[in-house]
Image: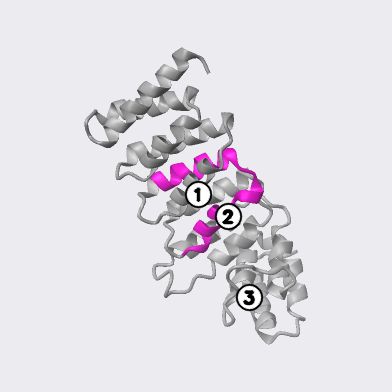
């Protein structure tokens, strides 16, 4: 590291410290973080980690981005720990947590996406954060995106009184780019494809999934429904028969 770069890094760190102590304008601290994102080293990680948890959204967002940029040059476990903590920190502003999700996604692989899954699992996660976590999982090519979305449709009224999470998950499932999604949903109905974090509602879960299949692709779902009407489970049979009748009334045939 050249002397000039080291001097610039030290100056940026002092500037950020001044902003955190409200001795310097906020804009100067944000600009200093951008500079550290361009040339900062591991020396800058502690001050950026402090900024990530200070009560200022602009500083938190820029700190997350700068930490990810530094990690790309100097992989350091402290960066991963800080960003994961910010993702899961429920007292953080949603915008700051979203920046942490996006920054973390840029520097990890699918083996280290646990905090993104936790966002989807928690009934306290706002929809904006769920959407950011889902984008991250897709970017990382996480193989069980559909399963995690199905689990989100299973939040009951106690955990999701307005139905916002369930409605969001259904919309995402309908739009999910996965040509096997009907087959996967069929396997979930039968229990051949397991859900790891939240089981189907024992009273309505299978019927909900069957109804979802008809919304995703009415015509292609008919072939699966014909198999389900012969199922040993009376709830599955009834739900499949009702779905078939509704599709016939709409003029949908295989």
Q: Where is residue 198 in the image (x, y as percent from the top left)?
A: 58, 70
SS of the residue at dot 2?
A: helix
Q: Name the residue under label 2.
A: 114
Q: Which is nearer the N-term, disc 1 or disc 2?
A: 1
Q: Which is nearer the N-term, disc 1 or disc 3?
A: 1
Q: Do the residues labelled 1 and 2 touch (CB within 8 Å)?
A: yes
Q: Do the residues labelled 1 and 3 touch (CB within 8 Å)?
A: no
Toward the front, the furthest residue is: 3
SS of the residue at dot 3?
A: helix
Q: Is residue 183 magenta?
A: no
Q: Name the residue under label 1.
A: 84
Q: Which is nearer the N-term, disc 3 or disc 2?
A: 2
Q: Kindly report which numbered mark, 1 or 3, lies closer to the viewer in this rendering.
A: 1
Q: Is 193 above or below relative to 103?
A: below
Q: Distance between the residues labelled 3 and 2?
A: 27 Å
Is 77 left, or right, of 163 in this rendering?
right
Q: Which of 210 and 201 is in front in this view?
A: 201
């Amino acid at each position: 590291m050249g002397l000039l770069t080291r001097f610039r890094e030290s100056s940026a760190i002092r500037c950020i410290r001044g902003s955190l102590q409200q001795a310097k304008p906020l804009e100067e601290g944000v600009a200093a973080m951008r500079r550290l994102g361009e040339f900062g080293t591991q020396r800058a990680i502690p001050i950026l980690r402090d900024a990530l948890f200070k009560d200022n959204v602009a500083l938190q967002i820029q700190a997350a981005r700068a930490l990810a940029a530094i990690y790309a040059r100097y992989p350091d476990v402290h960066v991963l720990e800080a960003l994961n903590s910010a993702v899961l920190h429920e007292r953080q502003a949603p915008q700051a947590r979203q920046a942490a999700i996006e920054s973390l996604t840029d520097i990890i692989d699918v083996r280290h996406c646990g905090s993104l899954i936790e966002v989807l699992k928690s009934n306290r996660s706002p929809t904006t954060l769920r959407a950011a976590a889902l984008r991250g999982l897709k970017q990382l090519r996480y193989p069980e995106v559909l399963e995690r979305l199905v689990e989100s449709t299973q939040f009951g009224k106690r955990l999701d009184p307005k139905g916002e999470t369930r409605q969001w998950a259904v919309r995402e499932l309908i739009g999910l780019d996965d040509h096997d999604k009907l087959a996967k949903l069929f396997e979930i109905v039968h229990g051949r494809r397991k859900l790891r974090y939240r089981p189907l509602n024992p009273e309505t879960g299978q019927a909900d999934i069957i109804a979802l299949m008809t919304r995703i692709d009415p015509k292609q779902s008919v072939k699966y429904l014909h198999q389900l009407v012969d199922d040993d489970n009376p709830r599955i049979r009834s739900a499949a028969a009702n779905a078939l009748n509704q599709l016939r009334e709409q003029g949908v045939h295989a």
